[in-house]
């Protein structure tokens, strides 16, 4: 089936057209999405979203502005970028990193990591509550300074200053 024939069927919302569309473009769109979204399951979800967007928004495609393939490729890329920028996706990545960190410290076979974790925790407990909060967000939960500022509802510059001062305090406690 040619692309022009496919477009006619899609405009008519012919159910067979969706299958043809998927068969013709799924592999190439999935490869573009996979480059951006590393998790295979997430990439498959994004691919599904892309085909739904193509199907629902076919009226916005304009041949005079570019090729159909370029149009659907942009939809795929933009949907993948939206996924990466979404708060839920970012939080799921942060939670995964935090869980891995906790499991590492709780592993009874790794005495060095356990002692090191306990030692750091004791030094962190000596810090001011605001420092504990900032270090927790930035280093243990993986927030950016901007995200920490939003979470704590304080200016970005204040987070940067507190972070620098807290790290200096921690260095003094550790005598590094």
Image (cartoon, rainbow, N blue to C red):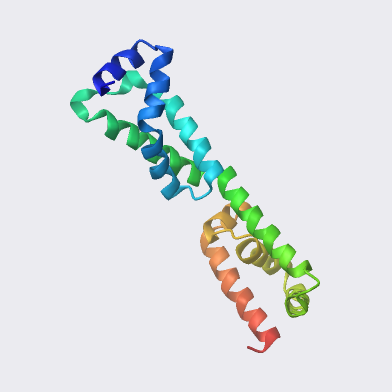
Direction from residue 7 to residue 101 in the image, left or right: right
From where the camera sits, is residue 66 visible? Answer: yes
> Is residue 44 found left or right of 92 in the rendered image?
left
For image coordinates 62% across by 52% down, the residue present is 151
Give whichever of 135, 23 is nearer the camera: 23
Residue 161 image-quadrant placement: bottom right
Image coordinates for residue 140, horizontal then vertical, percent: 66, 64
Question: Which residue is painted at 58% across and 52% down in the image?
Answer: 150
Q: Is residue 41 above or below residue 133?
A: above
* Closest to the observer, 119 or 173: 119
Residue 109 position within the rendered picture, expressed as x and y whole percent measured from the top left: 78, 74
x then y, percent, for residue 127: 72, 74
As drawn, the residue found furthest toward the bottom would be 175
Describe residue 152's horizontal placement relative to residue 117 as left or right: left
Indicate whether 129 appears above or below 52. below
Q: In which quarter of the image is the N terminus?
A: top left
Dividing the picture into quarters, in which one does residue 59 lie? top left
Q: Is residue 57 shown above or below 169?
A: above
Name the image quarter holding residue 168.
bottom right
The x and y percentages for residue 125 are 77, 73
Q: How many marks?
A: 0
124 lies above or below 45: below
Question: Residue at position x 66%, y 53% from top?
Answer: 95
Left or right: 85 as drawn, with respect to 60? right
Residue farthest left in this picture: 64
Q: Can residue 56 be seen here?
A: no
Quarter holding the C terminus?
bottom right
């Amino acid at each position: 089936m040619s692309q022009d024939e496919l477009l006619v069927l899609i405009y008519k919302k012919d159910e067979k057209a969706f299958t043809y569309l998927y068969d013709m473009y799924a592999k190439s769109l999935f490869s573009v999405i996979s480059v951006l979204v590393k998790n295979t399951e997430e990439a498959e979800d994004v691919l599904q979203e892309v085909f739904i967007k193509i199907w629902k928004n076919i009226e916005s495609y304009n041949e005079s502005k570019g090729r159909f393939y370029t149009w659907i490729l942009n939809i795929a890329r933009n949907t993948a970028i939206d996924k990466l920028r979404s708060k839920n996706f970012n939080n799921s990545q942060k939670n995964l990193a935090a869980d891995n960190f906790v499991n590492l410290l709780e592993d009874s076979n790794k005495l060095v990591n356990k002692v090191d974790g306990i030692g750091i925790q004791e030094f962190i407990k000596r810090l001011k509550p605001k420092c504990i909060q900032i270090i927790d967000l930035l280093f243990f939960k993986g927030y950016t300074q901007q995200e920490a500022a939003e979470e704590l509802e304080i200016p970005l510059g204040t987070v940067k200053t507190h972070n620098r001062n807290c790290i200096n305090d921690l260095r003094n406690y550790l005598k590094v």
